[in-house]
Image (tube, rainbow, N blue to C red):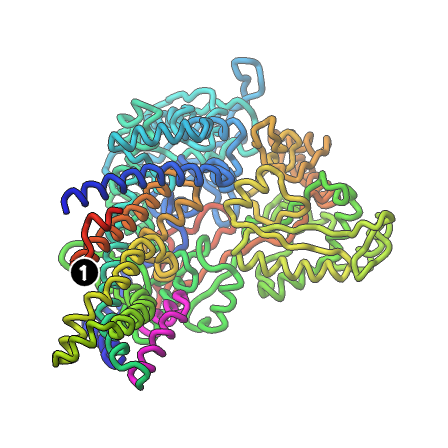
Amino acid sequence: MLSFLARRSFHSLIVLFVMSFVIYGLIGLMPGDPVDLMISADPEITSEDAIRLRAIYGLDQPLWSRYLHWLGAAISGDLGYSRLYAQPVWDAILPALGNTLGLLISSLTLALMIALPAGILAATRPYTLSDYGINLAAFAGISVPPFWLGILLILFFSVTLGWFPAGGTADAGGATELWERLQYLVLPVASLTIAGIGGHTRYMRASMIEVLRQDYIRTARAKGLSESRVVLGHALRNAMIPVVTVIALDLGVLFSGALITETVFAYPGMGKLIFDAIMGNDYNLALVGLLLATALTLVGNLLADIAYASLDPRISYAELDQ
Amino acid sequence: MKSFWSYIFAGAILLGFGAQPQQAIAKSDLVIGITQYPATFHPNIDSMLAKSYVHGLTRRPITTTDANWTVICMLCETLPTIENGGAVLEKTPDGKDGIAVTYKILDEAIWGDGTPITVDDVIFTWDVGRHPQSGVSAQEGYRRILSIDRIDNKTFTLHVDRRTFDYNDISSLNLLPAHIDRARFKDPSAYRTQTAFDTDANNPGLYMGPYIMVTQKTGSHMVFERNKYWWGKQPAFDRITVRVIENTATLEANLLSGGVDMISGELGLSVDQAIAFEKRHGRKFNITYMPGLIYEHIDLMLDNPILKDQKVRQALMYALNRKAISEQLFGGKQPVAHSSVNPLDWVFDEDVPIYPFDLKKANALLDQAGWKKKVKGVRVNASGDPLRFEIMTTAGNRTRELVQQVLQSQWKAAGIDIRIKNEPARIFFGETVTKRKFEAMAMFAWISAPESVPRTTLHSDDIPTADNNWSGQNYTGYRNPEMNALLEVIETELDPDKRKKLWHRLQDIYATDLPALPLYFRANAFILPKWLSGLKPTGHQFPTTLWVEDWMVTN
């Protein structure tokens, strides 16, 4: 397993290196540069100023030269400076990363805690009232636009009931901060959880139905095992394999793609940070943010591969590496 | 499913129980909602409204423009003028007309750490401002200062290389604390990343206003508390939190739930959003509208062979019912623009040519311009080419998109076919407008200042081209020798009466030539709690927070 991990880590590094080049190139090819944005906000900037500022920010250099300069600094541990937040990139990313991980872990955990049992329940009682009910709720969760759901949650729980803050993050420091942070997390977590439950329930149901049709399940039942033992002890492990793949892919998507939820709840997370960095022509910040999202997707896939091997003893690490 | 909803409600009740009701914020606290977070807290690097807004709480410029649009002293004792002897005409070392202006900093003016504000700070600010590597974005103001004489610790004279009418307005010379930042300026090229404004932003010594910043969370909020060294009138609130909420629907929800007490006019809801909010919740808040200096207009591409014809440009104006747009979409809160000069500006010309809605005149002008026939409702010329234009603006800007659709339908009535082609702001401003790639019309806004000379947008030297590396903001490609001469002479005319006449001529040419189609001046909507008074909207670029000590809590 160690050699598997080493090989996969090496492959991931190569992917990250290639992605850094591709992302830098794509951002660099987008129209305009930071100085154009400065000019549009400040009519006092003269032509001389524009030329001087482009030189200061290295924007007068060709793209490949800027990339090599960034890469050299990055290898030595300097990820650059964020023009948009006037601080080192890592300092700008760290708080957003913490916020996003809090949001991501809470919502994904909660969604899986609800979706997996619901999917199993629906699969073991197919085409019954409970199956129809769960499916209906799952489709509703998938269909509701996240921004609309967010606004509804705010209107109900913030404006009408006044239970939770309508958006933002905690002000207080010290002992009360954790409590405050939790309150600020409730509505965005609820929004992402509801959006996530539907899909995971449907995957779990479909996968479990497929497995329950297999011969070895019939054999297990013929042996006289209880239904719960058949489902949870024999079917669940195999049914989880495709679900694990989806969860792994979800990690990367949730990391950088919770933009709408973050915007509606004024929650300063990675999705909003990356979006603002791209729109604000902040090359360094956008690049590192996107690379982190890529890295998380790779880590998710690695974890999924490890999970495959533990879920199904027939799958070996050598096979996964091929 | 039962378990699902049970979890949600149980969790909600568990966490909500004991939570402070959002309305329970004491009156010693004020929470302001704005829609933008400052990119940097350095006062002279990058210009940004959000930064000006929060610096209004914590800093004071040497001079500023008040709510009556008059230049006043904030950190100086008396505004120097030629009349009171504070400004003296002189020759520069190379024999040009220059001016020497003397200021005396208030004796009681102190930084937030107790260090007196002195001429050292002025000289340090100038050193940073004019250094090519410092990262200060607009350096023209610093470059114009030839030297600074120290009269005493609190008095200094600026020797400026030209005589401009605004010679005593040094609002852009935002003082930097030499005792904190000078050491960080040893390597000027590293200064923009080392300045204490961004590496130690909660250092009280950076501020000299009624408040100092005590906490800031990037992208989320900033907290301000009283500055114990503030020498002026004490403000009403012990603590002010400025919360950044970009989504305006969420901002409204925060206001209604008590998460914020007020929404700033400078960076809050657009007028149409505020009008809708007022209809629903107007009784609970004081809502004030203040037209300002943000000039919404349509830049015309004058290289376009059809738009080269002045008759066509004037017909475009006559075919528009801008009054109806202002009344229907903005409740009449955003005044129709007749030129780039705001009617609140003292140099505004009451007799500027105006274009009331007159479809007959528009039709007659188009006939004269050779667009007589109509094919399927669209005018065509003798060669059969349709009178068709592409109009572009920033995609996703709901207000502009709405206005764009109304313009399209109004022009259709005159037989003008309009095609809408919008782009994200980044592409629109980053490429299309700045490199003059729009085919006919580009709708956007200019942010101006009182008596701001529109040199960069109207002088022919400022037409962006590949040769000048696309610098300049005369995107229409407007060329008029008389306008060039006016722009040059207005800036240096010290006699107000003579200058006013020059301004009137400038507006007359602008409104006749129409390099751009004036639409309206954007208004700011201030949504304030009933218990807050004393906040005076200014209508110009200096934010209301500069007078935060006048804000009061009333029953």
Q: Position of residue B413 (x, y in %)?
A: 76, 62
Q: Position of residue B514 (x, y in %)?
A: 71, 44
Task: Specify the quadrant of the image occupied by residue B111.
Answer: top left
Q: Amino acid at mark 1?
A: Asp
Q: Residue A270 versus residue B408: which sits nearer the camera?
A: A270
Answer with left or right where residue A172 lies relative to residue A26: left
- Residue B293 falls within the magenta-colored stretch: no
Q: Which residues are magenta?
A: A129-157
- Is B117 above or below relative to A232? above
Rendering quarter of residue A13: top left
| Disc 1: which residue | A312
In the image, what residue occupies the spot 59% across and 51% down?
B393
Residue situated in front as seen by the camera: A69 or B469: A69
User: Farthest residue in the top direction?
Assistant: B94
Callout 1: chain: A
Q: Residue at x 58, y 63 (%)?
A: B330
Left or right, B481 with respect to B81, comes to right
